[in-house]
Amino acid sequence: MKSLLIVRHAKSSWDITSADDFDRPLNERGKTDAPEMAKRLIKEKIKIDAFISSPAKRAKKTAQLFVHEFQRSKDDIIFIPELYNVSSSVLYQVSSTLDDDYSTVAIFSHNPAVTDFANSLTTHRIDDMPTCGIFAVKIHAGKWEDFENAQKEFWFFNYPKLKGGISE
């Protein structure tokens, strides 16, 4: 059994109008939401084996704030350029090529792809993945290469404005 957490980057800033989309930083809310969401996972004793991220500044910083809370090194984050300007098909490809040593993986990426991807995995639907939202599934497979065709089971959906713990 494998587990996948799909994380939309935290709230980004639009204050610097000259900044390229790739270089948009997190705003203050994003900088507080990301550690809070990581703490919710830690409270539920969810162990993440791999942190995979888009290299875009807002996704990268979200992943860094998560690894900090998990007391891991920023060097543990695996950056995949294809996770920026992504489609749900790319998210399937990335998931299918993960190292089988990883049981639980968090992928940090962007909308609308993360919403489309999450909605394609199970019958549980979300209208729009909120910033720093987490959609998690359990995958009935022993190898990530079997991800696309494996049975997937909704695990939980959580986001910053949803007060309380992880809801299954």
Image (cartoon, helix red, strand yellow):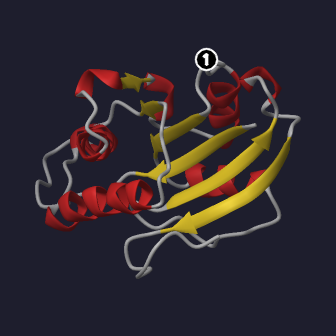
Quadrant for the C terminus in the image: bottom right
Q: Please tell me how crowded label 1 is: few (under 14), some (14-19), or many (20+) other residues with Cα within 10 Å.
A: few
Residue 151 is situated, as x and y percent measured from the top left of the image, at: 87, 44
Res 132 → quadrant: bottom left
- Name the residue: 14% across, 54% down: 17
- Name the residue: 63% across, 73% down: 127
Asked if residue 21 lies left or right of residue 152, the reply is left
Asked if residue 109 lies left or right of residue 103, the reply is left
Q: Nearer the viewer, residue 14 or 73?
A: 73
Q: How many labels does the image show?
A: 1
Q: Name the residue under label 1.
A: 99
Q: What element carries label 1?
A: loop
- Above or below 51: residue 24: below
Residue 86 is situated, as x and y percent measured from the top left of the image, at: 54, 37
Asked if residue 40 lies left or right of residue 127, the reply is left
- Above or below 78: residue 90: below
Residue 83 is situated, as x and y percent measured from the top left of the image, at: 49, 33
Residue 36 is situated, as x and y percent measured from the top left of the image, at: 29, 63
Res 71 → quadrant: top left
- Name the residue: 72% across, 25% down: 144
- Above or below 150: residue 127: below
Res 97 → quadrant: top right
Amino acid at dot 1: Asp
- Above or below 168: residue 17: above
Quadrant for the N terminus in the image: top right
- Name the residue: 29% across, 44% down: 21
Q: Which of 162 and 56 is in front in this view?
A: 162
